[in-house]
Amino acid sequence: MLNRNEALALVLKGCTEKFEQLGFTSASVCENGDEAYVDFTKDDITIRLVSHDNLLDVTEKAGDGEFVKTESNLLDLESFEERDIKSLCNEICDTVGTSYGKKARQAAAKKAPQTISKSAAKNGTEYDANTLASRIATLYPELKDAYKENFQTYDEFLGDDFFVNHANKYIMQTIRSHDSQTMKKLFKILSDIYENGSNDVQDLVVVTILGELNNDERLLANCRAQITDDDFYETLVAVNKYLASPAGKKAKELGHIVLLDPVGAGASKLRTDTALKFLLIITVLLPPLASARPLS
């Protein structure tokens, strides 16, 4: 297992030649709390590689401007070996080689939405859809362009659009093939985000993404082998059963509103937890004029 400074030192070593060819000079690895970073500079351009959590961000700034994140890459300190570091360096060098000199990035490109770090999550900040998508895009580099286009097109990040139209096919292929290493990385991301995410992002995980399992027993078993949180798995199974049921299929097809009346939900922890699980499965909206008539 590498420590953060060792990993970043290896990245620095692997990238220095390419950066020097582009006219950049490098500094040594610096620490900043739970992060480590290294700067490459040329004239008024600074490219900073920032290692935090299990990610390596490539950021840029011009002059005294703010750093703008241009991409995130997976840097798993627990599992990365020399060949993984080499592959990471190649990705970074390719990115810098094609984007360097485009100062229009600072002037025209929209700034990537801020992601939630693991340290922030530990202090009570909930993960959001953008953080989930950013981490998934580090696992599947083919998704990086789609991730950038999403927030640049809509001026905000739309999770449903990104996963339904782009990411889900990669995730489902991983689950079908049951590749152990990729499955481990995938569910490490999904489990962490689910456990520490907002209700919206939990819904994104179990309904929008893993609802695509279509209640397939083999695929659910593949997932079960990677999920240690019983609550996560039970909710996943409940979602799939509902979506695969005649009622679930018809409601989805017709776009019908579903009303949940959680009688006695606060009477016990079991009832409360069960009601909260159902809130992840269905859209809870009161019908028009519901306030004008009793619900019992």
Image (cartoon, rainbow, N blue to C red):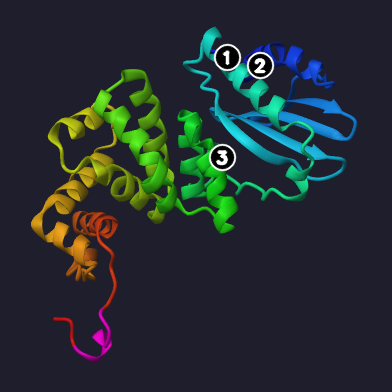
- 10 Å crowding of disc 1: few (<14), some (14-19), many (20+): some
Q: Residue furthest right?
A: 43
- 10 Å crowding of disc 3: few (<14), some (14-19), many (20+): some
Q: Amino acid at mark 2?
A: Val
Residue located at (65% from left, 23% from top)? 94
For discs 1 and 3, the disc positioned in front in the rendered view:
1
Q: Amino acid at mark 1?
A: Ile
Task: From the viewer's perspective, tell me whether residue 2 is left or right of residue 37.
Answer: left
Q: Amino acid at mark 3?
A: Ser
Q: What residue is disc 2 on?
A: 11
Q: What residue is disc 1 on?
A: 85
Q: Residue furthest left?
A: 246
Residue located at (48% from left, 36% from top)? 143
Would residue 198 be visible to someone looking at this image? no
Q: Residue furthest bottom?
A: 292
Q: How far across and down, in percent of the image, does residue 38 sit?
A: 74, 24
The span from disc 2 to disc 1 (Cα, nearest Å) is 6 Å
Q: What residue is disc 3 on?
A: 117
Foreground pick, 215 / 238: 215
Residues in magenta?
287-293
Query: Mark 3 or mark 1, which is nearer the start of the sequence?
Result: 1
Magenta stretch: residue 19 in it?
no
For the residues bearing labels 2 and 1, Cβ distance under 8 angstroms: yes
Label 3 secondary element: loop
Query: Mark 1 or mark 2, which is nearer the start of the sequence?
Result: 2
Label 1 secondary element: helix
For discs 2 and 3, the disc positioned in front in the rendered view:
2
